[in-house]
Amino acid sequence: MISKSRWKLLAMLALVLGVMVWYSISWEDRYFELFYFPVPEKKGLCLHGETEKTVSQLFGNYSRDQPIFLQLKDYFWVNTPSAYELPFGTKGSENHLVRVLAIISHSIPESIQSLKCRRCVVVGNGPRLRNSSLGGAINKYDVVIRLNNAPVAGYEGDVGNKTTMRLFYPESAHFDPQGENNPDTLFVLVAFKALDFHWIETILRDKKRVGKGFWKQPPLIWKANPEQIRILNPFFMEVAAEKLLHLPVQQPRKLKQKPTTGLLAITLALHLCDQVHIAGFGYPDAFHKRQSIHYYEQITLKSMAGSGHNVSQEALAIKRMLDMGAVKNLTSF
Ligand SMILES: *[C@@H]1O[C@H](CO)[C@@H](O)[C@H](O)[C@H]1NC(C)=O
Ligand SMILES: *[C@@H]1O[C@H](CO)[C@@H](O)[C@H](O)[C@H]1NC(C)=O
Ligand SMILES: *[C@@H]1O[C@H](CO)[C@@H](O)[C@H](O)[C@H]1NC(C)=O
């Protein structure tokens, strides 16, 4: 009996030792592809300025003075010159922009502003959220950022039902602003072209809609309260493109590549939050080409061809952020 339990103990020790050795030598990029360590839920453990340190490593000489949302006073009383055209700046789109800024708001809600430490989660639209049961955990963050038309209804158990901000552009605005969101959700427009400002103006002022110039017909009716609409500072698109994907941003029209809304949302979160967690990022691997890339619809990686997104470059950028500890992942990647 005694020797049997001793063997058991020895085997346990050997196992622990083995895991420790393996753990210390395999700490490299590949690790994240192969294994998944759930982030233990440590509620309340949020260090102010936690991301700021890693962000300076990641982005180099980077200013945190930039406003999150564009505001009228920067374009009306003074003309804030922008170095780049959309989607990386506002150069040349100011006239359209000012008309929208005159009817919407730019403030960050007091409930976020007043937090000593902001814990944020960026919920991607990937298939890893399916059956994840992460809904309850996601709802606990101070700020929940969702992307495009990602639904909540019917998926609450896996993706939660709290939405602090939803990043979108006209072609991805096919969601019900009232039904799929909370009464205080902020709808954050990511502008790729001047026409995107014009679209939101025609919707809010109920002016004649424009049909041409979009790669997909945006909604004609979109009932959102102007008070809940914001325009994301294109600075974040510039940072995502330049610092994370190393794209030349000087001549956007010649540049066929741009960051996805997901990468953009992470960039924004690193600026806004003290703690950034992500969930539902990553695409199916090469062996599962026919697996859907979204948790809510059947659509494969093939549909990304010609989208102007460099999926593998983005995966590398996200891996780098995970390795550095700038962000933590609630799902596998
Ligand atoms: C960093 O940025 C500031 C202002 O944006 C600039 O004055 C400074 O020269 C930059 N430093 C480096 C090393 O690029
Ligand atoms: C999720 O769970 C349901 C019911 O338990 C099951 O039918 C389905 O196949 C699961 N989906 C995935 C992607 O694992
Ligand atoms: C989310 O769902 C829970 C449980 O169904 C509900 O009590 C809560 O009000 C919902 N929250 C929001 C923001 O819709």
Image: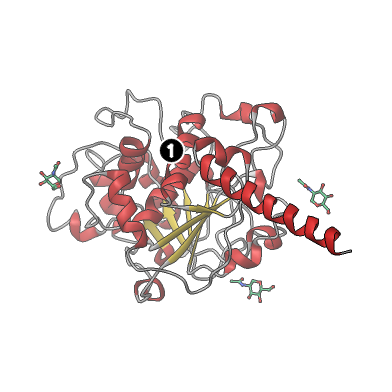
Q: In the rendered view, tell whether residue 310 sits above or below residue 74.
A: above
Q: In the rendered view, tell whether residue 131 sits above or below residue 141.
A: above
**Label 1, on which residue?**
317
Q: Residue at x 59, y 43 (%)?
A: 22
Count the marks.
Answer: 1
Q: Quadrant of residue 275?
A: bottom left
The answer to whether residue 11 is left or right of residue 193 is: right
The answer to whether residue 37 is left or right of residue 169 is: right
Residue 35 visible in the current orientation: yes
Q: Amino acid at mark 1?
A: Ala
Q: How crowded is the residue under tag 1: few (<14 C-alpha within 10 Å), some, or many (20+)?
A: some
Residue that protrudes farthest toward the right in the picture: 1
Q: Quadrant of residue 253?
A: top left
Give the quadrant of the N terminus. bottom right
Q: Residue at x 36, y 41 (%)?
A: 240
Residue sitting nearer the eye, 186 or 262:
262
Give the quadrant of the C terminus. top right
Q: Where residue 321 sits: x, y (%)?
A: 43, 45
Secondary structure state at the residue bearing disc 1? helix
Residue sitting nearer the eye, 299 or 73:
299
Q: Residue at x 33, y 61 (%)?
A: 103
The answer to whether residue 70 is left or right of residue 312 is: left
Residue sitting nearer the eye, 305 or 101:
305
Q: In the rendered view, tell whether residue 173 sits above or below residue 8.
A: above
Q: Where residue 262 sits: x, y (%)?
A: 48, 45
Q: Where residue 247 sits: x, y (%)?
A: 33, 30
The answer to whether residue 284 is left or right of residue 10 is: left
Residue sitting nearer the eye, 90 or 237:
237
Residue that protrudes farthest toward the front in the picture: 3
